[in-house]
Structures are given as C-alpha cells and as structure tokens.
Image (cartoon, coloured by chain):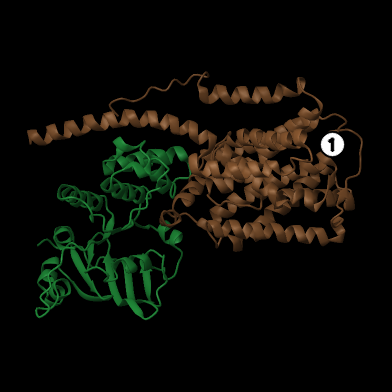
Amino acid sequence: MDKKTIQVKSLFRPAIIVPAAVVLVLCLLPQFIKGYPLHTLTLIILYAALGSAWNWLGGFAGQASLAHAVFFGLGAYINSMLQVHFEVNPWVAMLVAMAGVGIISILVGLPVFRLSGPYFSIATIAIGEVVKIIFINWKATGGAVGMYLPIRESSLLNFQFNDKAPYYYIILAFYFVAVSITYWLKNSRSGYYFRAIKEDPQAAKALGINIVQSKLLAMVLSGMMCAMVGSFYVNFTLYIDPDNVFRFMTSVQIALIAVLGGVGSVWGPLIGSVIILLLSEGSRAYLGGIGAGLDFVIYGLMIMLIAIFQPNGIIGAVENYRKKKRLKKRQMQEATDAAKEVGDHGAA
Amino acid sequence: MPQRRWAIMALLELTGVTKRFGGLTAVDNVNLVLNEGEILGLIGPNGAGKTTLFAIIAGYLKPNEGKIVFNGVDITGKETHKIARMGMNRTFQVVKPFSDMNVVENVMVGAMMRNASVKRAREKAMDALEFCGLAHRADYLGRELTVANKKRLEVARALASDPKVLLLDEVMAGLNPSEVRDAVEFIHRIHARGVTLLVIEHVMEVIMPISHRVAVLNYGKKIVDSDPKQAVSDPEVISAYFGSTDEGRGDASC
C-alpha cells in the first residue's frame, strides 16, 4: 500500500475508448459495405453472439459444451414451427423459443452436470447427435427437407426486410445484449461463483456455493441467448433444416470462437468470430469445391496451436503480456521487502 | 487453570458417527462434542481418520451410521454448501486456492456468501486479508503465493463468510518453525474474534498449547478426549504415536 497506483478516472481510459470505438465502427459499417460482405459481417456478429453465450458456460463456469448448436437450432425450430403452424408473430415466437430452450437446458443440464471435464463435453456431443436424428425423422418439422418460412411484407414487426442492413442492426443489438450480460457476469456474484466453480468445485462448495444451481444458471442464460440468435437466423435465411442448424461442426465453431478469442473475456468472441468466419467464408469463396473442408483442417491446426501455445486465447495473450510487466515490478518489490525483513530481525 | 466455558452450549455434536470404505472402517463410532467458544484439537497419527471425519462433518461424505447436529439442527447428510451457509466452514489439508483468481477475488467469493453486493464483498474481503496479514498480496494470483500464504488465504476466505465454527485441517503442516509460531498466534487471534475452532493437527507440540481440549483418534476410534496435559501422558496415546514398547518405534512427528 506504500505505492497506490493512481487511476485516472477519465473518459479517455483504454478500457472505455477501445470498446466505444469498436461499437461505433460496428454501427457505421453498413454505410460502407453492402451485399455479400455485409452478409458475412452479419454472420460474424451472429457467431460472436453465440461465442459470447458459450463463454458464460464454457469460459466462466468451465463447462466446455459441444452442443451449443442444439440450443441455437432448437431456438430456430421452435420459432419457425410457431410461425408456420400457428402464424405467431416472429418476435413473440422468439420469446417463446427462448423460454422453451431455457426449460430444455435445465432438463438437459440436470443429468449432464453430474459429469465433469471431458465426460461432460462428450455427453453434450451425444445430445447434439440425438437431437439431430429426432429432427431428421420428425414429420411436423419437415423432416430432413426442413421448412420454409412464409414471406411477409418488409417491416420490423414482421422481422423481414428487403434490405440486408436492418438484419445486421438487429443481430448487432442482440450481440450487444450478449456483451452486456458478459460485463454483468464479470462484475457480479454469479460471475465470481462461476469462476470459483471452474477453478475448484470442492473449495467452491465449502464457501456456500450451490454448484448445480450456478451451473444451471450458466446453462440457461447461455441456452436462451443461443435461442434468441437462432430465432434471428431463421428469420434471416427464411429456411431451416436439421443439417443446417444442428451441425456438429457449428458447435465446434462456437466453442473455438470463444476459446480462440479468449476464455472468459468480453470482446474475445468477436475477435475469434472475425478470424473463424473469414477463414471459413474465405476458403469457401476462393477454393470452392476443391477446398471444401479445408477450413476444418485449419480449425484442427488452430485447436492444437491454441492448446499448446496460448490456452487463454488472443485476449489472454494481451493480458499475459501485461501480467509479465507487473510481475517484474513485483519481484523488485519482494526483494526490497525481504531486505527490510532481514533488517528488522537484525534489530530484534 | 481458568474455568473453561464448556457445557454452555454444544455447538456441534457427533453421535456414533461411522464411515466405512469397503472393508476399511475409517471412522468408527465416534462421539464428539464441540462447545461454543472453545478450541478443540483433533489429533492422531497419520491415517487415523481425522480428515475423513472433517469431510463427514462438512458434508463431503455421508456417514454410514451416526448423527451430526450443528447449532441445534440435524445436518447428517446435508449438502456442503448448505452447511457452509449455516455457519460452518473449513479449510483443506491440501490447499485449494482459486489459482487463476487474485487474492482479493478469492476472498471475495467467501465474503459473497453473506454479501450479494460485489462492492461490499470487496470491502469485507480486504478486512479479512488485513486480519490475516495478506493485504499486501491482494493483487497476487492464488497460485503465486507461498504455501504458508496459501494456507492463510484459505483461512481468510473462510473467515470472510463470518463462520460460527471453523474447521482447520492441518494449517501448520509444511510450515517452518517461525511460520508455525506465527500460525499459533494467528489461531489465537481467530479465536478472539469469537470463532469456535476445531483444529486437526498431527504434530503434538503445536496443538497442545492452543487447544482447550483434545480428542485423539487412532484407527478411526476416539481413544481419548481430555485436557491436553492428560492426553499426552495417556498410555494409549503414547502407544498410538510411538508404538507399543516391544515394537520400539518412534516416529511421532512425521
């Protein structure tokens, strides 16, 4: 406490300026880009939102799920079924889908959270496959053929537009909801509890943390966010089939986006999403048929590289650099502390 | 000897607690009373069942038989986090700091048990760190601390949740003599805050001066429950620690 760092509480701190700049750029981008690039940008934001949702459960609470495409797909399916069979307004359908997936994630979480670590992840893979098979064979959802959403007049209320820009702004708004929740988690009791559970569940229990309840909260938040994004997705593409939304690779992508960007960080998923989406869209656009699947090869390589060199992702790398600087300062202080202690003992 | 405050109220009461792992009876029909405001030492040679008994009290293990009453409520088989919220907290023999969280954040998690507000929890955590002499390490990561400080961190984390009873599991093992002296003084200060303590230790020289009363476990059975002075001279305790005379072994301290 001899040297308290004086924090400049100005508006021009990097912690405020950088996010503000990011938000501004994201909001202004559609003014400059149109067509396919804007479509890709929409997908980047969509995956950033999914990555953020994964981050709450996988990054904060340490439960690495490989079934997030399930929550996403279920949200999309519930939404489209309500629209197709019951002519429900898309926004209302979205709320119902979120509530439905929230309940489903509790039902899934209760048994699966009895497993930990890799066993948890494997169980989530199994769930993903089971759900996919159910939807492929279920007549009411159109089976493997899928469903088309009815075309409506272009308006916000109908969740359909002639232009791509409104879609982009809607998903951007959803993404900001996800970012706000991440900020909240970073600074709330629940967020601390999630991290404590990830670090050491036994010690967490001793401090009065109800582990199952906390994990379920992470799962429900995460699932509902995915359902919200899934609802957007189906209104964006107006078409849904099981192979499209329940792909195992989508689950891997979501996890990879969060891990690559930075586990437990606020902006990491956005960075991860930019990299992963540019990779997959790029390989599809430029390599076409020959390069099909090349992005998966690159994912594999990236997973290995991250695991070996930078388990904390890109944001983690930046933080590590800062920590190293702090550590140097600390070692110097410890040396002076030790010298002082020796001096004190000498006096006594 | 000053009059002790026993028999005012039994805060924790174990009756006939038994735990078996397959053919091994780790804890065998143990009766134990912890009175409000006392420091009870739980000692015994390695493998006597002390840590198992702790795990049972704190709700990590369910006993096969017996009953545990805490503060007038039957807590046998209750979940750990519920027991913690009732005001009984523990530290671990093998320290379990949250390695990637810094020291204040570690303690804040403890403080959050009674404070939903993060800001208030931070204040409480700083108080607890101040009390435990760790305030100058507040921004260190859990894993960057020395073993002695990790043990203090565990105590700080537990204290931040305002426990009535604190179960300390070998907080002094692995400390050097000067650290042990600090730790003894530290335990006295915790007790002075009004916390009732149940302390596991297998080094006799450490536990004797701090305990009001000691219970000795051997092969899962409680063999003695008395004054520290009486306990050390008890022939059963001596043979448990040093072996019976014809065996002639003497490895009491480690």
Going 57% across and 51% down the picture, which residue do you hit? A64
Q: Which residue lies furthest to the front in this view?
A: A290
Q: Which of A126 and B9 is in front in this view?
A: A126
User: Which residue is labeled 1 in the image?
Assistant: A157
A212 left or right, relative to A172: left
Q: In this view, does B92 lie above or below A41?
A: below
Going 36% across and 44% down the picture, which residue do you hit? B143
The chain drawn in green is: B
Q: Which of B168 and B84 is in front in this view?
A: B168
Going 27% across and 42% down the picture, which residue do you hit? B131
User: Is residue B70 at all visible to an observer of this figure?
Assistant: no
The chain drawn in brown is: A
Q: Quadrant of residue B209?
A: bottom left
Mark 1: secondary structure:
loop
Q: Where is residue A152 in the image (x, y as percent from the top left)?
A: 91, 38
User: Quarter holding the N terminus of chain A?
Assistant: top left
User: Quarter holding the C terminus of chain A?
Assistant: top left
Count up the numbered dots. 1
